[in-house]
Image: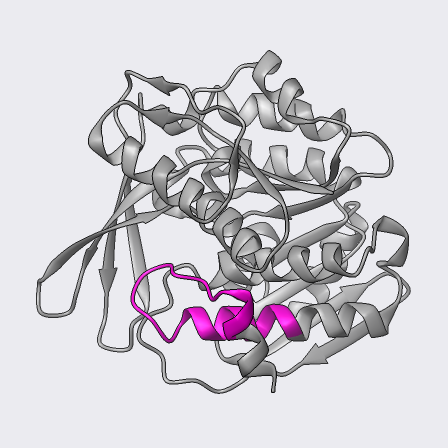
Amino acid sequence: MMILVTGESLMDLIVGPQGAVHAAAGGGPFNTARTIARLGQPVRFLGRFSADPFGTLLAGKLVDDQVELALPEQVPEPTALAIVSLDDAGIARYWFHLTGTAGFVLDRQSAARALENDVVAVHIGTLGLVVDPMATVVEELAHQLPAPVLLMLDPNWRASAIPDPGVHLDRIRRLLPRTDILKTSSEDLAFLAPGPDVPAAARTLLGWGARCVLVTDGPAPVRVFIPDGQQLTVPTPPVQVVDTVGAGDAFGGGFLAWWAEHGLGRGQLADPGLLGAAVASAARVAALTCTRAGAEPPWRHELRVAER
């Protein structure tokens, strides 16, 4: 059964500590779709590609990883760009060139066609919920999902790309009552529910409607919050970090891939044992992504070796 990933693809222009520039394919949903495919699960990507050389490269990388393209036809708008600055620890900062770019061209009819009967889970978030027309279309699509379809939302909050944080936060709040899994980082929480207390922020998001909140915080353990005050803490494996680009996207993709591989749905999200196992697998996927330059998630065989 199919996982549908909606959102943007773009090119990361990565500037290292010494000033060297490297171009790499990226975009949160793009990275997530590649992760799911490399882990052996069927995945469809709902997003547009430019007719420029970058657009051809992005679409080709997805096809090479066996991601199905919901919209393979190219459009004349240019590819979106992200300027990524890496410090000596490999931590990334972002600046974006998004206006009038191909990745956010989306209409209601194309979105509806992508949501076929084979879709069991949908991933939304990142800049796909910021830039119109895609943001409005994806929000509508989420509210129209059939009842059995699981929805993961990854805000992946990029302050430099959000012209009106209040409008964006309102959109996320409207989506939370239909959100099964809210995947956030500690940085996301600072924008979504400001305050020094992560559990209190997670409870706020649960109160707004999310059924499960996953909070990542770099190498620190992942914290999992579900209703009725239940909380899990899942350690992350230690690795030699090259950079952290795409790690959060790999985590979300790793979780969905594990969940789908085990035939699970919305009804099993209240099971702490299953949640802990899925999060542990996702943490390994994210950790392996950090061991290589750029957003390059591991393949299934590489994950199996790491698990052993």
Observer able to see residue 215: yes
Magenta stretch containing residue 299, yes or no? yes
Tell me which colouring the rendered structure shows: one colour
Q: Position of residue 51 (x, y in %)?
A: 27, 22
Q: In the rendered image of this protein, does residue 275 appear above or below residue 125? A: below
Q: In the rendered image of this protein, does residue 267 appear above or below residue 289? A: above
Q: Residue at x 24, y 35 (%)?
A: 54
Q: State the quadrant of the N terminus.
A: top right
Q: Position of residue 103 (x, y in %)?
A: 39, 29
Q: Residue at x 65, y 57 (%)?
A: 257
Closest to the observer, 2 or 130? 2
Q: Position of residue 156 (x, y in %)?
A: 50, 51
Magenta stretch containing residue 25, yes or no? no
Observer able to see residue 156: no
What is the quadrant of residue 59 in the picture? top left
Closest to the observer, 233 or 241? 241
For the record, the magenta segment spans 281-302
What is the quadrant of residue 241 in the picture? bottom left
Closest to the observer, 137 or 301? 301
Q: State the quadrant of the C terminus.
A: bottom right
Q: In the rendered image of this protein, does residue 274 appear above or below residue 107? A: below
Q: Position of residue 77 (x, y in %)?
A: 29, 19
Closest to the observer, 76 or 204? 76
Counting labels gives 0
Side of 72 relative to 46 (left or right)? left
Q: Residue at x 42, y 26 (%)?
A: 48
Q: Residue at x 75, y 34 (%)?
A: 118
